[in-house]
Image (cartoon, helix red, strand yellow):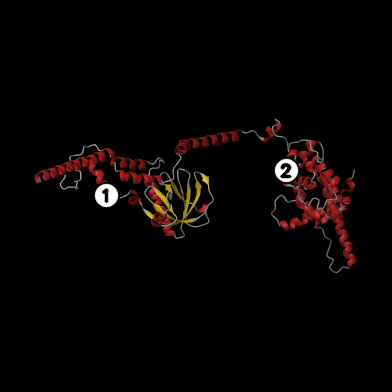
Amino acid sequence: MQKSTNSDTSVETLNSTRQGTGAVQMRIKNANSHHDRLSQSKSMILTDVGKITEPISRHRRNHSQHVLKDVIPPLEQLMVEKEGYLQKAKIADGGKKLRKNWSTSWVVLSSRKIEFYKESKQQALSNMKTGHKPESVDLCGAQIEWAKEKSSRKNVFQITTVSGNEFLLQSDIDFIILDWFHAIKNAIDRLPKDSSCPSRNLELFKIQRSSSTELLSHCDSDIKEQKPEHRKSLMFRLHHSASDTSDKNRVKSRLKKFITRRPSLKTLQEKGLIKDQIFGSHLHTVCERENSTVPRFVKQCIEAVEKRGLDVDGIYRVSGNLATIQKLRFIVNQEEKLNLDDSQWEDIHVVTGALKMFFRELPEPLFPYSFFEQFVEAIILEGGSLKSASLSQKQDAEKQDNNTRIEAVKSLVQKLPPPNRDTMKVLFGHLTKIVAKASKNLMSTQSLGIVFGPTLLRAENETGNMAIHMVYQNQIAELMLSEFSKIFGSEED
């Protein structure tokens, strides 16, 4: 009976041992199939119950698979070259300009990229939220240069990536920023200039050859940390970068040929492609074209102002809407039919502004350059010394001096070319009507002299004292207004 019991026990032990050995062999087989083993596993020897020896492989590749993760540390530890705090500003993302905002970043430089953390890398990794990745800059094909003009701060350099991202890095400490600049530049120089970055493909090739699951997964996550690029758009930019340069050169060449072969202004005017303009043309040219001695536009403006602007406060002093004045100017230059009674010219200050612009844009002012000094000399004429004279004598002398000025100015006016003389007579005759309503429009002789003096008279070369010239310009305009009937009396129709 005892024998039978011992026999049964030994049988159960043998069966359990066989089952355990079979299970071990099954696990090894499954593991090999999972890792795609090339060599078949050998039978295992069960030295002790529950203890299994490690499979021994004579295949060198299989051996490297088990020891590679223990021998080679992560790539990130091998490639970190420099790290520290810098001031960073991202000014472009994919070519799109961004507002410059400076912030302090913990910068980590590796052999092929830069990573930006808000704090030191160890703290950032420990405090990092799930799924949050640091901002990464791929250095393959990147450019680095000093950028003094991009910021008022000192020690600023810029990094531009092939994807169109632009970063500014800065530090107030000279040797720190200089060290960073050279470190990043050396890293970029070591990488291939081609933005496809074969060095990265080589690393992936080595990883695939090693067949290390752990190393592959680590490097894969490391690569995913970088900002993903839109491959199609990137390849499009790379493909067309060279063609864009050639296109620009071709456009420049065509423009250069067009400019050198362009017809002259006179030819275009003769063909009717460019019409003679009113604004900016010489006074005698406009008058010859219109077969008159006073430009039609000047007459139209004066008629409109006398019709509805004599009582307007600040007439000729208040500025009209510049956009509307330019619109009026364009219509006049295109020789379109002008109706100043139209509602769009309802603001009389637009009309007066356009009239002042016409005289201001004359290539030679209404008082010709050759007469400027003569008018100045006429206005400063004075008699002899009257220090010891009585008040009545002084008044008589001043009156005599004023008459002398009037005669001198009148003589000069008569010597002017007909377009200048007749236009001057029409304009100052109109301005005397403005002065007559000074109680309503508040525009005195002095006010109009200040407005029209610099517009109608100016020296050809402003080499003298401009302040003195302005005084004389105003005084001449005032004399022409206050003594209009004496200066132009003999010229009245």
Where residue 179 sits: x, y (%)? 40, 56
For disc 2, the marked residue is 326
Q: Secondary structure at mark 1?
A: helix
Q: Amino acid at mark 1?
A: Asp
For disc 1, the marked residue is 70
Q: Identify the residue at horizontal 51%, vertical 57% (top origin).
A: 153
Residue 339 can be seen, yes or no: yes
Q: Amino acid at mark 2?
A: Gln
Where residue 290 sits: x, y (%)? 80, 36
Q: Identify the residue at horizontal 21%, vertical 37% (top origin).
A: 40
Q: Identify the residue at horizontal 44%, vertical 60% (top origin).
A: 173
Choose between 189 and 28: the one closer to the eye: 28
Question: Seen from this angle, which residue lies furthest top?
Answer: 271
- Image disc number at residue 384: none
Q: Quadrant of residue 191?
A: top left
State the separation of the CA atoms marked 1 and 2: 80 Å
Q: Secondary structure at mark 2?
A: helix
Rendered-image quadrant of the C terminus: top right
Q: Is residue 492 left or right of residue 356?
A: right
Where residue 266 sits: x, y (%)? 69, 34
Q: Quadrant of residue 203?
A: top left
Rendered-image quadrant of the N terminus: top left
In the displayed structure, 394 sits above or below 159; it is below
In the displayed structure, 228 sits above or below 482; it is above
How packed is label 2: few (under 14 Cα within 10 Å), some, or many (20 or more)? some
Number of labelled discs?
2
